[in-house]
Image (spheres, coloured by chain):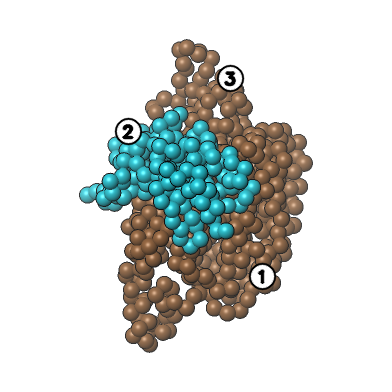
Chain colours: A cyan, B brown
Amino acid sequence: MSDGEQAVQRIQQLYPDAVVGTAAYRGQHWVEIVAGRLVEVCRWLRDDAAQRFDFLVDVTAVHWPDDEQPMELVYHFFSYPRNDRLRLKTRTGATGPVASLSGLWNSAAWNERETYDMFGVVFEGHPDLRRILMPDDYSDFPLRREFPLYRG
Amino acid sequence: MGHTFERSEEHPDIITVNMGPSHPATHGVLRLVLKLDGEQVVDCVPHLGYLHRGMEKIAENRTYLQFIPYTDRMDYLSPLAANIGFALAVEELLGVQVPPRCQVLRVICCELARIGSHLLWLGTHALDLGAGTVFFHTFKDREWHYDLVEDLTGARLTTSFARVGGMLHDADSAWLGRLREFVDAFPGRADEYEALLTGNTIWLKRTQGVGKISGADAISYGMTGPPLRAAGVEHDLRRARPYSGYENYDFEIPTGSEGDIYDRYLVRIEEMRQSCRILDQALRNLPDGPVNIDDPKIFLPPKKKVLTSMEELIHQFMIVTEGFECPAGEVYHSTEVPKGELGFYIISDGGRSPYRLRIRSPSFNNLATLPHLVEGGLIADVIANIASLDPVMGEVDR
């Protein structure tokens, strides 16, 4: 099975009301779920004996300004025991909020801070949600699409 | 931020000390705010971003080829590895596979980058802990390595050597001969570094049992690369997720058992030897044939054809002025660079630049463990811990 395929199928079976859609490209499968079920599904992905996604590789966002829910949060998982990868997505409004995964994986802490710093998405339950790359007194969110590359 | 020392009124014995961002042992512009009780570290808060250049934003406004020079400037101690990691991600998005000779050439570049990166790590790590002699040995050999990189790519640091669908150019036989001399001599050099450190009492006291992390914690913190393997997790993307034909090479994945600074040291030393093994096999099995794909819509056509054929001239003009289009889709592709897992997550909307390019940096995630490693330890060990994580701020801040 290609990356994430089995996990995506299981999520569809177990959490049918949470799944918004699934897709695949070049053998990489992903699933979009509703934001309110994020922690529940992620905890299952980490703890289920057939999943064991013990490594949260990356947290980031993609801004789609024309969409009703413009922020797409993207989580990449890896399972060391199963050598499998999974991409999980969820949508929120421009400033979130979305639940933090820092209670499940320590790697969420800094990556969520960066996502907040760059996109302005608020992660609820994050222990230390501050900017990480930009100065503390900075007011913009540079990776939003409307942020200009040059400011004359 | 103007102060350096600050004594808290509630806890008069706790002193806040600022370290960096310009400090010789932070290996770049990293700032730490440390709370100290005597010599003991009570709290450590890293401040990043001094080298943030907005690479992910820039990528949305550049063609895929134009982004390659930016990858030099992430981990500037192993730019070749980042060049290739990015090229592989775009090739995955396009569904393109490079010819066998290119694959082997890329393995050579990646392993050369690993040796170069680890040489800098070892020299500065030892220097930070007072063993200055090691620094001169490793930097002498690092110059040798840089001579090879410069002869191959034309640059020591800003190599920009990979292309989507190939490489800037082939390696000639004279260069391969010089690389052979390096590969044959280097394991002996590694023995010399070890003679200076591995049984050295001061080195052992400064590194053994210091900065320990368990395998489970390392995984939870998103640690990758040598620090993860030193914590006993036998994982290497070259083995777990082979790319560029790594499945065809015989090499070992060194691991540690304690997860301390000493284990990270041993793992990287052994990785340099294993890189030499891989280089040796690559040199013996380098196939003949083309290096680049024959697809003038993606890869620049040969100059001779550009000067004689209208069609090739147009292709060159289009690639240089506008770049090529990538089909709409998204991929995550990662490679095992010297620091750990370097991932590129690219979303294409069918255009000539990425709609979104996310860089998953190993240095960023490894550095996130620093407070966990140093809290409760001594201030002198902060320096040893930073060096043992081997972060490169260019890659942390991007």
- The quadrant in which residue B129 appears is top right
Q: Is residue A57 left or right of residue B196?
A: left
Q: Residues within 10 Å of mark 2 (few under 14, many from 20)?
A: few
- Could you tell which of marks 3 and 1 lies nearer the N-terminus? 3
Q: Chain of mark 1?
A: B
Q: Are marks 2 and 1 on the same chain?
A: no
Residue at x 75%, y 39% (from the top left corner):
B200
Query: Which residue is identified by label 2?
Result: A137
Is residue B395 at least partly visible in the picture?
A: no
Q: Which mark is residue B38?
A: 3
Q: Chain of mark 3?
A: B
Residue B177 point in image, percent of width and height: 65, 72
Between the residue at mark 3 and the residue at mark 2, the CA separation in whole angstroms equals 32 Å
Q: Is residue B127 left or right of residue A141?
A: right
Residue at x 55%, y 23% (from the top left corner):
B42
Q: Amino acid at mark 3?
A: Gly
Residue B19 point in image, percent of width and height: 49, 31
Q: Amino acid at mark 2?
A: Asp
Query: Which residue is identified by label 1?
Result: B283
- B379 to B164, vertically: above or below: above
Between the residue at mark 2 and the residue at mark 1, the CA separation in whole angstroms equals 53 Å
The answer to whether the residues at label 3 and label 2 have Cβ atoms under 8 Å apart is no
